[in-house]
Amino acid sequence: MNLSSGFWARGAALVALWLGILSPAAETIRVATYNLETYLDAPTQTRQPKSAEARAQVRRNLLALMPDVLALQEMGNVSALQELRESLKAAGLDLPYWEHLAGFDTNIHVAILSRFPFTGRRPHTNDDFLLGGRRFRVSRGFAEVDVQVNSHFAFTLLTAHLKSRRAIAAADEAELRLEEAKILRGIIDARLAGNPNLNLVVLGDFNDTQDSLSTRMILGRGRTRLIDTRPAEGNDDDAAGESPGGGSRRITWTHFYGKDDTFSRIDYLLVSPAMARIWVTNQTRVLRIPNWGVASDHRPLVAAFEAGDP
């Protein structure tokens, strides 16, 4: 090496070090959602506790994904959430920060576990609406938190569990779901109106397919339309093909509905345009693992993001 090349090599190294100090390296984080199918630790009038075998499979499923932030649906009381959190920690997945929402439904709840602290919590538990001359409550509410990943990156997470597809006498289930979706979309619009560049993740069990009125309501339109990450199985397809009606043929179902013997995609992980810019598409998937169904009638899904510069 001559003196000139040595000088430039040392200079390049100093510049790289200086840039590294000013621009911290991006950190890849994983955000997941999972409907646990009645994760209760004590019986209620209508539901039984989750078996030890099912709880063990829940842990195996989550350990296969290793999420940094995890939205949960059909969680039991706080004690059930803490049991899950402690059992995951013992197995090597430590998610010390948590949020548990007590909504109108007293049996099952939405919750959040996180490796990162929350700098803001906005529980939505008192929303209601009129339908057919009757007033209804949003059954499970919406959990909303601001997650501080590091000194230079944060995002807002909003999770939901909309009305199930089970028919009830009081009103049409799809109409109830649409009204809940309208309220959820109102929260999304308010956040993006305040900050169009907000890093926002909206996820959970929406209980309907992508072409339903309720799911389309949550997705929105125009500049504030959310992007559907559409996690699929990692089945090593080079090209899964396209259907004549549009859309990839990758395997994306998230739920088995025993009544109709059908598999469908009703769980979603949506992101704002700003969050989509740091989305790592090749680390986004729905879980494919033996015995997944011992844990729940849903499969968990995860998306990855590069948490770099603000």
Image: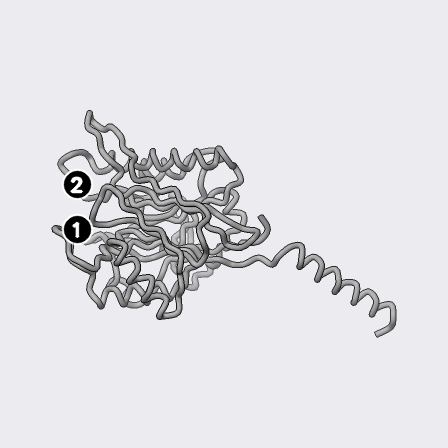
Viewer-proximal residue among 243 and 128 = 128
When the figure is inspected, residue 276 is found, relative to residue 283, above or below; the finding is above
Q: Which residue is mark 2?
A: 167
Vertical comparison of 239 with 183: above or below: below
| Residue at 44% over, 41% down | 226
Number of callouts in the render?
Answer: 2
Q: Secondary structure at mark 2?
A: loop
Which residue, as the protein is rendered here, is positioned at the far right? 3
The residue under label 2 is which amino acid type? Ala
Cα distance between the residues tagged 1 and 2: 12 Å
Residue 221 vs residue 197: left or right? left
Do callouts 1 and 2 mark residues in contact (Cβ within 8 Å)? no
Residue closest to the far bottom: 1
Give the image location of residue 125, x and y in percent. Answer: 30, 40
Establish if 103 lies above or below 287.
Answer: above
Q: Earlier in the sequence, mark 1 or mark 2?
A: 2
Left/right placement of residue 168 relative to residue 157 reads: left
Is residue 201 visible in the rendered image? The answer is no
Q: Nearer the viewer, residue 219 or 190?
A: 190
The circle drawn on residue 259 is 1
The residue shown at (25%, 53%) is: 77
Residue 19 appears at what percent x and percent y? 69, 57
Q: Secondary structure at mark 1?
A: loop
The amino acid pointed to by label 1 is Lys
Q: Position of residue 113 (x, y in %)?
A: 37, 56
- Look at the image and tell me in which quarter the N terminus lies: bottom right
Q: Quadrant of residue 245?
A: top left
Please give the name of the residue rendered at 41% of the width and 35% of the height, measured from the top-left corner. 220
Closer mark to the observer between disc 1 and disc 2: 2
Residue at the extreme top of the image, as rendered: 133
